[in-house]
Amino acid sequence: MNAQTDIKPYVIGLDLGGTNSVFGIVDSRGDIKATTAIKTQGFDKVEDYVNASVEALQVIIEQVGGIETIKAMGIGAPNGNYYNGTIEFAPNLSWGHHGVVPLAKLFSDRLGIPVALTNDANAAAIGEMIYGVARGMKNFIVITLGTGVGSGIVINGQLVYGCDGFAGELGHVIMKRENGRACGCGRNGCLEAYCSATGVARSAREFLLKSDEPSLLRDMNPDDITSLDVSIAAGKGDKLAKEVFEFTGDMLGAACADFAAFSSPEAFIFFGGLVKAGDLIMEPIKRSYDEKVLPIFRGKAKFLISGLDGASAAVLGASAIGWEI
Amino acid sequence: MNAQTDIKPYVIGLDLGGTNSVFGIVDSRGDIKATTAIKTQGFDKVEDYVNASVEALQVIIEQVGGIETIKAMGIGAPNGNYYNGTIEFAPNLSWGHHGVVPLAKLFSDRLGIPVALTNDANAAAIGEMIYGVARGMKNFIVITLGTGVGSGIVINGQLVYGCDGFAGELGHVIMKRENGRACGCGRNGCLEAYCSATGVARSAREFLLKSDEPSLLRDMNPDDITSLDVSIAAGKGDKLAKEVFEFTGDMLGAACADFAAFSSPEAFIFFGGLVKAGDLIMEPIKRSYDEKVLPIFRGKAKFLISGLDGASAAVLGASAIGWEI
């Protein structure tokens, strides 16, 4: 990262989500200078998506002084492969679900700048290292608690991509080997099946069924309960809702204890919607971790909440990959 | 590793075990040019241990042409901390169990060469990368199946030490969260409690108790059964002994599936006494892994047996750290 001395002071970040594609032009301090967005869907061909993107981008590129001021572009995208700059078999993208899409090359050819691409959790990890709470850290793990559970792992100051570009799928370690919940990946008992936002909502429904504890959540149609509802109820002191967070945090702490045995990180950094529950989720994670981790690691790791600004965190994360090229 | 062009063609390796300390002088091809050994125990003070070691070493150092031919020394030792060159609270060492012993510095001061130290599983991983089956690989995991289960993890061509020097304790990920076996670490359900040599012997005793299947192992006093006995019986086609290896391999495959979600290695390399069982253990590992791993990783990782010569593998591994200094 030689942004400060480089004559090109900006990078472009693209947070490519299932619904929206948000672009930002970011300086080396993590200040977003300009932003724009398009709908991700509605394009049959990836070329049409790239055309629409570049058209929107050109406006904000001019705002910051033209393409000459831009060092590179980073993309955070589902099923993103860093090594190839491709999106591979992304089930939720109309133009990307049937094969391997060379998205980094397509943008690079159009814009004339280097473009790198990875998945959103890896982008978040680089974002924390460059702009966030992991500045100066060489060994840490970012765990994203959103619709799914994702992760970005940094070891010796480098993101872990593995032999194929797909390392860091910590949402899919098995936490319950017998009678585990079905996971979207087709297997059972994954961390994600319990500790994602949808997992938390599912836990709430299960807890409501198996006890007759009074709860604010009983006023709702069970199928409508979201993790935010559980969070709000727990914030009001609802015992059952708090038990759901205890259960979730207990499992996340147990998972982190296993991750410590792998890479002994300096910090675990939590990111995403569920983190808004604050201590309701963080305290059980820390308690469970300290109780379960191998004694040699006890008390060493920090448990932090993402330092990236919520609304723009994903764009910042994506842009951060641009500095790493 | 610039051994070939260096005028100092050798490194010293020390395999520091609970009983014996074995020294070898090794060239860059992994040929052991000279070897010696002393008893590890029987010294009250670490200085006495180092004195005895240096006395033994001087003989073989002269054999290869004097200390001027030696680039560095690598030590593989229990509870070895690479960052500090220390052995920390090693329970089995008479001169090392009560604190932090700066062993690398003590040897370096006496020999006048750089000395690095790590645990034996990490040493094995570096050994595989420099002399063994992992030559040319940048992402792999060595799993040692001996008295305990150890591991050395290489990511982006570097050994993973973590924030404190103690990363890579994969024998202590939890494989059974409910009613798990007691582990030597004081917790329950660790991989090591099932898949170490002692774990295999324990599984055999459990299997004998819970079935009335005829078995060659019934001719023995249950307390005397070792993993080697199980291996020999299985090799003769003993059904119960084969089931013990199926059970052990099944769990190792499940563990490797979780490890793949972490670092997506190119290969898992197995090392240590249990590996002598060959396909009896390797086939169930591979079968279980392919069945359980996240689909995106299926069929990508190789499952290999250590390429280091059995008798001298630990010395070779230790010496390999010397090239990395």
Image: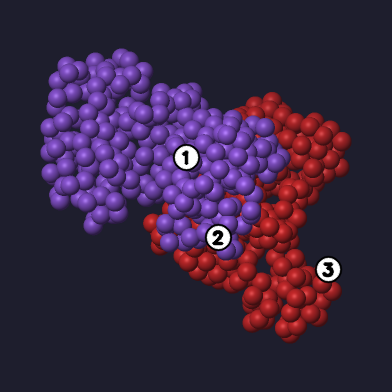
Chain colours: A purple, B red
Q: How many marks?
A: 3
Q: Is residue A25 above or below residue A37?
A: above
Q: Secondary structure at mark 2?
A: loop
* Residue type, numbered disc 2: Gly
* Residue type, numbered disc 3: Asp
The residue drawn where x is 37% and y is 50% is A164
Considering every residue shown, the one lying at the far front of the view is: A219
Q: Secondary structure at mark 1?
A: helix
Residue B321 percent location from the top left of the image: 57, 40
* Label annotation for residue A134: none
Q: Secondary structure at mark 3?
A: helix
Residue B92 percent location from the top left of the image: 80, 45
Which residue is labeled 3 in the image? Answer: B223
C-beta proximity under 8 Å, tags 3 and 1: no
Residue B118 percent location from the top left of the image: 63, 39
The residue drawn where x is 26% and y is 39% is A20
Q: Chain of mark 1?
A: A
Residue B167 percent location from the top left of the image: 59, 40
* Label annotation for residue A180: 2
C-beta proximity under 8 Å, tags 2 and 1: no
Q: Is residue B269 left or right of residue A213?
A: left
Q: Which residue is nearer to you in this view: A39 or B177? A: A39
Foreground disc of the pair 2, 1: 1
The residue drawn where x is 48% and y is 60% is A182
Foreground disc of the pair 3, 1: 1
Quarter of image, res B89: top right
Which residue is labeled 1 in the image? Answer: A228
Q: CA distance from mark 3 to mark 2?
A: 35 Å
Q: Which residue is nearer to you in this view: A53 or B238? A: A53
